[in-house]
Amino acid sequence: MRFFKTLHFLSLDVVIGACLFQYLVTSIFMAGQFPPFVVTLALAFSVWTIYLVDRFIDNRKPIAHSVLHDFHLKHTKKITYLIVCNILSLLVIIIYLPKYLIINGFYIGFFILIYWALLIFGLFDRIRFLKEISTALIYTIGIFLYVFLNVDQVSFLFVSILVLLFLLAFQNLILFTLLSKSDLKRDFLLICVEVICICLWFAIFSFAQLSIFLLLPFLVTFVIHLWIHYISKSKQWVWLGELAFFSPFLYYLYAIIST
């Protein structure tokens, strides 16, 4: 339990989940292939840096403290060093990436800088859930970028899985924003996201030929968040909500057993 909470405090659970889903969507749309290790490494350090900087900026605001924020305040200097090391690591990794990924990565990096500027100047505080939408969008684009730039055509299934992953990330962020504010009574948008996810499931099962085991990680992640929303209703399970994104392990476990 303590180990998983430390992973969550350092946002490493988010990093691992992003890399696992990148492997999963690559294997779905590129005939069982996996992304090159350097591509996954770039995603890992990018996601980690974004989330650490995000926490760093949040801790400079006069907000109600949580255990997570207290952890970052206590270790501010160490986390600052960690952010610098991550950025330096990214600069080294970029050298080994394909040119097309570097160019598109810089485009995404530009939007992330805008995202941080809006976060610093408080625009996200004025528009409800704008921050959660932006974070979920950046997270999804990062995971799908390599696949999007390498598939021959963008199919209905591709768009459906992309939207589904975005909604799962958005569901996670809305849920724990509401829980942190003890505001689950104002969960109309969260319910709408859940309903859209269910409709999307029906569309995928009806029109796309895809093994249930490839979709299982998405379903498990969704169900865990439903459990937290409607049964647990406690912010102490935030770490479990993040670990839900480890669910692609289920597919890899199935692949090993079936082999």
Image: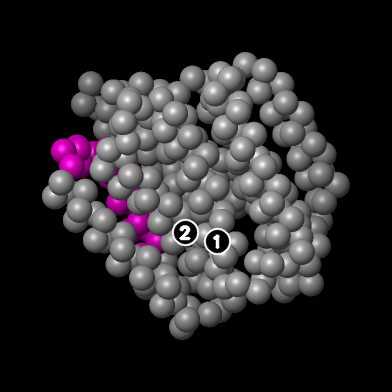
Q: Are marks 2 and 1 in contact (CB under 8 Å)?
A: yes
- For label 1, the SS is helix
- Three-letter code, disc 2: Phe
* Residue annotated with mark 2: 170
Spot the residue most to the left. Answer: 206
**Residue 107 is a magenta residue:** no
In front: 137, or 183? 137
Q: Which mark is residue 132?
A: 1
Res 42 quadrant in image:
top right
Q: Specify which label sits upstream in the sequence, 2 or 1.
A: 1
162 in relation to 191, above or below? above
Q: Which residues are magenta?
A: 208-227
Kindly identify the residue that appears in the image at 37 percent across and 65 percent down.
193
Amino acid type shown at disc 1? Glu
Residue 248 image point, x, y percent: 37, 39
Does the magenta-highlighted stretch encompass residue 221? yes
How many residues crowd mark 1 within 10 Å: few (<14), some (14–19), many (20+)? some
Residue located at (20% from left, 53% from top):
203
